[in-house]
């Protein structure tokens, strides 16, 4: 067979361009018939420009959330005159960038379906990316065969705030399982004008629950659940700093000088303590002074701290399935009149704690926030339940 005038590409080169493993291309060839059609000397099959264009379409659809079969159908049903190389390459680069991946190029200026300027690939091609392409991605919202409909898919929201929290949650789980830290950071973004409780209830908490149910074949240092948890903490720190920047007063007085502070505790065995951080951030966003108690907790330290600060209320909140309640019991014994709110799971047995007159168990996170905010807001006019002798 004579060598074709237009150069063709090897599996390695095409895999590198698409950002997939060579084994993924072989799977697409075997499963969907999207394989190389050109031949070089030695009867080695190579990908023509039209082959590459179809694969770019398929890769773009997969990145946008289509299943493998839907993406393959969209690529196969395109007519040759609809496969404008420049257009589909631009669509792919946009999809890769929106997914937090860095596009690679085979040529600076491909001129069309023939792509006569494409370089010839050989066994010396650079090593391809080993990013796995999901075969069971969520159902695509836009399906079809024409390149114009592909452009509609490409115009998906570019910022997380254009997606609903449930949509962001689905994307967040997918990106966390792929260890895509950049995409997860973008999806977790929360701004001072956002409702941080809705952010927690509809985005972060459901994503963490879903990730906790996944069994992952991970590499060293990879943990999707901790990735999302730690990035959520970073976003809450960013959220709080933005709130502080809006407050021209800057520094705050020492907590011991305040009479309406709320102390938020998390059980010592709750490592991330995300519910405590979220509740505290929500209180700060609504002009209530609140602080989280971090570090080793024992009965003596906690009672001493509470006696010094004299808060308007204390809160224990956690999603831990087996929280340590010993500190709560001791604190309630020492300060029986102090409003104490418990935001713990419904399966947690509180025993005799629930019968204490100033202990309230709140099952809804939103209701917990409102009850605590009300207690902090009413502190100025409420009877002083602190015994001055208790500070001695």
Image (spheres, rainbow, N blue to C red):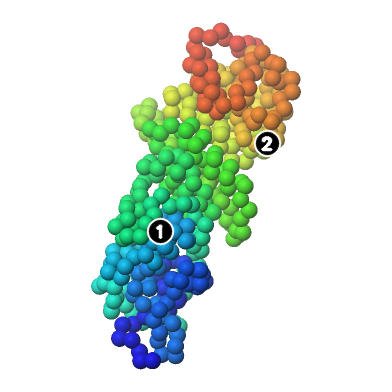
Q: Earlier in the sequence, mark 2 or mark 1?
A: 1
Q: Quadrant of the N terminus?
A: bottom left
Residue 13, given in percent of the width and then of the height, sits at 42, 75
> Which one is in front, 375 or 95?
95
Q: Hey, which residue is sitting farthest right in the picture?
A: 351
Q: Which residue is mark 2?
A: 321
| Dot 1 crowding, Cα within 10 Å, few <14, some 14–19, many 20+ | many
> Which one is in front, 157 or 279?
157
> Which one is in front, 339 or 29?
29
Position of 76 with respect to 324 (left or right) is left
Q: Is residue 96 visible?
A: no
Residue 174, given in percent of the width and then of the height, sits at 50, 52
Quarter of the rendering containing residue 7: bottom left
Residue 39, given in percent of the width and then of the height, sits at 40, 84
Q: Is residue 207 above or below residue 222?
A: above
Q: Quadrant of the C terminus?
A: top right
Position of 322 with respect to 226 (left or right) is right
Res. 45 mark? none
Q: Is residue 356 above or below residue 349?
A: above
Question: Which residue: 70% across, 16% down?
Answer: 355
Position of 72 with respect to 298 (left or right) is left
Q: Is residue 168 above or below residue 386?
A: below
Question: Which residue: 51% across, 35% down?
Answer: 201
Q: Which residue is mark 1?
A: 61
């Amino acid at each position: 067979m004579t060598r074709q005038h237009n150069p063709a590409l090897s599996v390695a080169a095409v895999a590198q361009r698409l950002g997939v493993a060579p084994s993924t291309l072989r799977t697409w060839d075997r499963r969907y018939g999207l394989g190389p059609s050109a031949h070089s000397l030695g009867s080695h099959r190579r990908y023509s420009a039209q082959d590459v264009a179809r694969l770019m379409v398929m890769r773009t659809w997969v990145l946008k959330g289509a299943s493998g079969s839907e993406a393959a159908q969209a690529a196969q049903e395109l007519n040759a005159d609809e496969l404008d190389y420049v257009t589909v390459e631009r669509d792919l680069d946009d999809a890769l960038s929106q997914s937090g991946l860095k596009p690679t190029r085979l040529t600076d200026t491909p001129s069309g379906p023939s792509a006569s300027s494409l370089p010839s690939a050989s066994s010396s091609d650079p090593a391809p990316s080993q990013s796995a392409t999901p075969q069971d991605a969520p159902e695509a919202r836009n399906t079809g065969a024409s390149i114009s409909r592909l452009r509609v898919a490409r115009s998906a929201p570019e910022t997380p705030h254009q997606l609903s929290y449930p949509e962001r949650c689905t994307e967040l789980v997918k990106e966390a399982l792929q260890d895509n830290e950049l995409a997860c950071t973008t999806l977790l973004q929360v701004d001072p004008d956002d409702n941080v409780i809705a952010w927690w209830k509809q985005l972060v908490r459901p994503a963490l629950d879903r990730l906790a149910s996944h069994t992952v074949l991970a590499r060293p240092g990879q943990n999707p659940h901790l990735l999302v948890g730690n990035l959520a903490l970073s976003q809450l720190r960013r959220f709080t700093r933005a709130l502080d920047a809006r407050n021209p007063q800057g520094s705050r007085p020492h907590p011991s000088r305040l009479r309406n502070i709320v102390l938020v505790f998390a059980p010592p065995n709750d490592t991330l303590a995300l519910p405590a951080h979220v509740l505290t951030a929500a209180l700060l966003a609504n002009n209530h002074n609140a602080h989280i108690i971090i570090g080793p907790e024992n009965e003596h330290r906690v009672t001493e701290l509470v006696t010094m600060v004299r808060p308007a209320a204390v809160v224990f909140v956690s999603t831990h399935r087996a929280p340590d309640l010993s500190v709560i019991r001791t604190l309630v014994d020492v300060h029986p009149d102090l409003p104490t709110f418990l935001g713990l799971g419904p399966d947690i047995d509180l025993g005799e704690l629930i019968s204490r007159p100033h202990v309230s168990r709140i099952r809804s996170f939103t209701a917990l926030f409102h009850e605590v905010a009300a207690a902090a807001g009413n502190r100025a006019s409420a009877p002083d339940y602190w015994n001055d002798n208790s500070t001695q």
